[in-house]
Image (cartoon, rainbow, N blue to C red):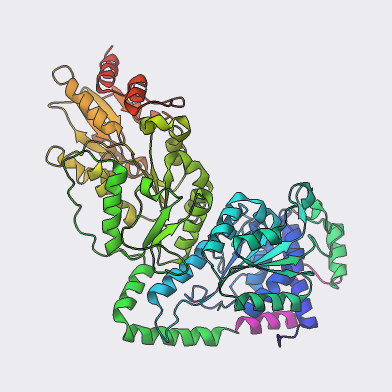
Amino acid sequence: MSTSVYNRKDRASVDTLRLLAVDMVETAQSGHPGLPLGAAPLLYVLWTRFLKRDPLVPHWLNRDRFVLSPGHGSALLYALLHLCGYGLTIDDLKNFRQWGSLTPGHPEKDVTPGVEVSTGPLGHGLAMGVGLAMGERMMGTRFNKPGFPLFNHFTYGLVSDGDLMEGVAAEAASLAGVQALGKLIYLYDDNHMTIEGSTDLAFTEDVRGRFLAYGWQVIVVADGEDLLSVHLALENAQRNLEKPSLIMCRTVLGAGSPKADTPKAHGEPLGAEALAKTRQFYGYGDQAPFFVDERVAKNFHQRSQTYVPERLAWEATLAQYRIDYPEESAELNRRLAAELPELGEAKNFPQKDLSTRAASSLILNDLAQKLPELVGGSADLGPSNKTILEGLGSFLPLTPSGRNIHFGVREHAMGAIVNGLALYQGILPYGSTFLSFADFARPSLRMAALMGLKVIHIYTHDSVGVGEDGPTHQPVEQLAALRILPRVTVIRPADAYETAALWPVVLKRSGPAVFILSRQDLPVLRPDDYPAIRTGPAFGGYVLSDSEGTPEAIILATGSEVGLALAAQKLLVGQKKIRVVSLPSWELFEERDQAYRDSVLPPQIDKRLAVEAALSIGWARYLGPKGQMVSVEDYGRSAPAAKLFDALGFTPEKVAARVLGLFD
């Protein structure tokens, strides 16, 4: 039985959180007051009695992680961060949702001190929390030693009805059960209300039964206002390290306001009259907005000092660890600093044709021997994507040192979990699927870009070259869709050597990167024949094969179509002087100065033909007013790849004819 006693001071502290949040929303005339009013008791108990943290050292490695999955409730989180000593001032709270403020509309990593994860799209926070919990297990397995528990903490989160409706949450929760993530604990703000009305309109399932079926422990708190019941539930959750825990807390949206338990409490200011009545309900009717009683401030300050001794003891443990385990310490320091060891020279490849997925597999396995932080897997397509790390085992509860993650057929959750792993630090994660299914993971990739996370996505089966599998598996629009994402580096290498040249580039860059790789075998472009292929790909675009004398036209291509461009160039020898430019990464190419780009694509050469088995969207920037494109502007067909390429104009003869047509 818990010895913690909750008294009037605690109740006043909860109500202060509530009113600070609604004052923020009212001042901004924008935001979501309902969740803070209902969920404040849950987070008060968690943050003051359980969450292991030190606001003076917010990035302490062994801190507990907290994820606010319903990010629209950010005002409650900011109120907590203010009262718990993370440096947010009352003026910061008053600047809620304004330009350049530390209190944006939804929590943003690296903007607000104490915010671990950017959240807003519902379900993503829940899924990223799964990745954080997996990260704690991975790092603990690698670095913990007897008497040196460097990584030993919980991952907590608040989830909402909306979170649990999202498919990404279902996928991630299912996998969390398989992984038996006993240090993952979620408080469920079970208020039975959505923007459109009661959850009975669209969400009537047995959530308890569903999570029990996933393999979770489920604890029910009948009244979320009962601080002691919430406390006891969290204690019980901590004791069960065999299963993740969902604590279902019955709450009221907009509790204490005239709009309580109605959709109007969700996403709009209460209004002056309703806010006055809410303040009166909680006994603060005579106080000005943003009022904090001295006793409440002292209570939060004292509670925020709870784990300072533990943090100091941990630092002493780390200092001794560095003496006793110098090799492990050196690796830990390198990984946390995101520094790379010496990777060695790019390998040579066999003479035979090789798909870029197979070439990437050889490189990936070579890198895995040098980068113990490299972990990842596929959405049940490892043998097809060729992303299995050979001999390095499966990451499972009984084999936590394994480095192959089995995500199952869960592309959406895979992307979000990979984000969580990257957020943990010291881990370099990748995920993989077919390019045609990249859209399932796209929202997670967008979140990775927003947060600047170092994640790698490997998408294979990159074109109509998939052939007989037909249009459902033949990507057409995905490449263009990936290229329009800000802060994402998209790589489509032409062969094994371009793949080898670009992997180190990706590893050295910040932010997310995507490899687009072929299923079909491609000619290996020998460096003896094409010297630029060793270093040129790092520039994003380069002259792979030039004409003798000043070029009259340029063929631009990426990926599997580069070999096709080279074949067309050979057919035109003696007729026209043709330059072949490979553009494996538009993002890398655009980072080069104008002089370099003009040296590759001289402005005076306006006869240009681009060849890519995908939509032509975006290519105009490189083609100019007289350029043309061999592309795929509709879906493919179920047929052998050779037949498809011929029908769509992707043969050396047809490309050569299109080049000659430029001169007409």
Give how far across and how far down residue 500 sits, in percent: 25, 49
Name the side, left or right, on which 342 lies relative to 109.
Answer: left
Left or right: residue 483 versus residue 24 is: left
In the rendered structure, does residue 303 fall within the stretch colored magenta?
A: yes
Frontmost residue, 470 versus 202: 470
Asked whether residue 4 appears in the rendered view, the answer is yes
Query: Start and end of the magenta stretch?
Result: 286-305
Position above or below: 264 against 209? above
Q: Is residue 94 visible?
A: no
Percent of width and height locating residue 553: 24, 23
**From what the image shows, is residue 114 above or below residue 498?**
below
| Relative depth, front residue between 212 and 426 | 212
Residue 287 position by quadrant:
bottom right
Q: Residue at x 32, y 82 (%)?
A: 325
Residue 206: percent from left, percent from top: 72, 57
For image coordinates 35% across by 73% down, the residue present is 333
Which part of the image, by quadrant, shows the C terminus?
Answer: top left
Location of residue 596 with respect to 221 vertically, above or below: above
Q: Position of residue 590 (x, y in %)?
A: 35, 41
Q: Quadrant of residue 244?
A: bottom right
Left or right of 358 in this view: 81 = right
